[in-house]
Amino acid sequence: MISKELLKGVLKPVILKVLEENGRMYGYEITQTVEQITKGKVKLSYGALYPILHKLEKDGTLSTDTEMVNNRARVYYSLTPQGKTVVQEKIEELEEFVSTIQILLKPNLGLQFC
Amino acid sequence: MDLTKDQIQYLENFIDKSGINYSHLRDDLLDHMCCDIEYRMESGESFKDAFDNVLLDCSMSHLAHLQKQTLLLTNKFYSAMKKIVQIFGVLVPLIITAGAMAKVYHWPGAAALLVLGFLFLNFLLIPALSVVSYTEFNDKKYLTPHITVGISAFILSFGLLFKIMHWPGANILLLAGGVLLLLNIPFLLISVKRKLQPESIIIPAIIGIIALLTGLQCKMMHWPGASWIIVGSLVYINVFLVPKYILSKSCTPARSLFVIVVSIWITIGSMMSFYNTNKNCDSYYTAQAEKLNADNEKYSALLTKSYSDSTNAEAIESFISSYNNVDYYLSKNSRERGHAIVPNDLELLELYNNYISEYEKVQEVTGGKSNLYKLDKGVPMNYIHLYSNVLLLHQNEIIKLINQLSTQKGELK
């Protein structure tokens, strides 16, 4: 399991990426998908997922539609046209972050720059 | 495996109870919980077990917290108000406590600190708290009660400030605020009900808090029976309510510690209203006045003896009789009442003014070295306080007369 502190900053691009690839999804589906892809290493809790989804919806990145499934309302999230450009930006930002951190974590950091 | 309608209804009630109502968050969470439980039931768990397991991730307090997190991210005004509450929620009690301490010990700046603290409280903390609470309720039907509770808190705290500063109108403000707050108790009941678990503690807690507040209000208005109500409600809170809460299931160690600290704080704070500064002043000045009275009687006798052949016997006689009148009025009042001068007590105010002018004369004669205490109209001042100072003044006056007579007669006292 990856710690919540580490996940905090990368949740938004991860959720956007999953939505970009799968199109229209509901909350539980997003958590399950992320869990399956990462083989259970990344678990999205209720408390982490929904505040971000609502924030993205408020920003106009996501749109929602509701469908009745098994006697209950199911809210589906999907990217808006505007959201699709946001995804690219967020993912590029995250990739840059990951590669930067990787440089920092390389062994013998000091010697390389001698 | 699909959930039945009853099971879904059960979950719906659970979510509603935790107060989730922001946008489609309720639908999100209901569906998520249903999916979670269905998934667990497919691997053989019963609905009850599955629900209990899911609850580990999303208890009622988790859900309420989740809604707050969502509001913080999506509502900028709410998050700004929340910041104000966090900052001034710490700052205001600190400023007011510092001001109160300064006032008790007669340090400079007490009034400024108190006024500043109450201004922050009334114009920042109370409005921000109302906005935060109303946003969390997210229900238009709570708008009016929020406004009225906010206004009554505003009036009450100004009443408290006016009372502490002895400004006119304090009692009216306290009474108006108290009545307005009392009218909103049904609303307060609902709002506390949402936040407090377990539910069995809510009604007793409300009763205890209302009793304590009523007692404190009576105390501030100097109504009879206040002390009994305060002591009774404190005993009720500490002996019955706190143990009941701590022994309840949903009480974690951190919460019990919090509850104990708060109850100690409330108890000490309420008990302090019995040992007010007036009482301490009273006993100090009563002792001083008794001593001065005895001294003055001796001096008066001496004076009477030595002025019998003096030329201005009439003036001295009238001085002594006026002094006896003051004595009588002040000692009578100081035994009956022990609280501060109020602006509409004209008789005492006149005495006060006389005292100040006499005081200034004495200061001038002695070059500011007399042992008289300059009574300040702003600080709480009571009859016994003034009485003992007037006695001291008279002592100075009598000694002066004796000395005058002695030099006239060419002999020492």
Image (spheres, coloured by chain):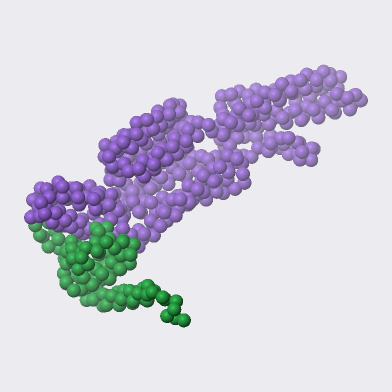
Q: Position of residue A92 (x, y in %)?
A: 30, 77
Q: Colour of chain A?
A: green
The answer to whether B297 is drawn above or below residue B13 in the figure is above
Q: How many marks?
A: 0
Q: Quadrant of the N terminus of chain B?
A: bottom left
Q: Residue furthest right?
A: B410
The answer to whether A42 is drawn above or below residue B328 in the figure is below
Taking depth in this image into account, of B28 and A105 the one nearest to the observer is A105
Quarter of the rendering containing residue A32: bottom left
Q: Which chain is purple?
A: B
Q: Quadrant of the C terminus of chain B?
A: top right
Quarter of the rendering containing residue B314: top right
The answer to whether B14 is drawn above or below residue B174 in the figure is below
- Residue B167 makes an appearance in the image: no
Residue at figure coordinates x 39%, y 60% from the top left: B80
Q: In the picture provided, is B335 more to the left or to the right than B270?
A: right
Taking depth in this image into account, of B133 and B31 the one nearest to the observer is B31
Q: Position of residue B176 (x, y in %)?
A: 41, 40
Q: Position of residue B281 (x, y in %)?
A: 60, 31
Residue at figure coordinates x 31%, y 49% from the top left: B144
Residue at figure coordinates x 24%, y 71% from the top left: A16
Q: In the picture provided, is B242 more to the left or to the right than B351?
A: left
Q: In the picture provided, is B205 more to the left or to the right than B270?
A: left
Residue at figure coordinates x 79%, y 24% from the top left: B316
- Residue B163 makes an appearance in the image: yes
Q: Position of residue B306 (x, y in %)?
A: 84, 20
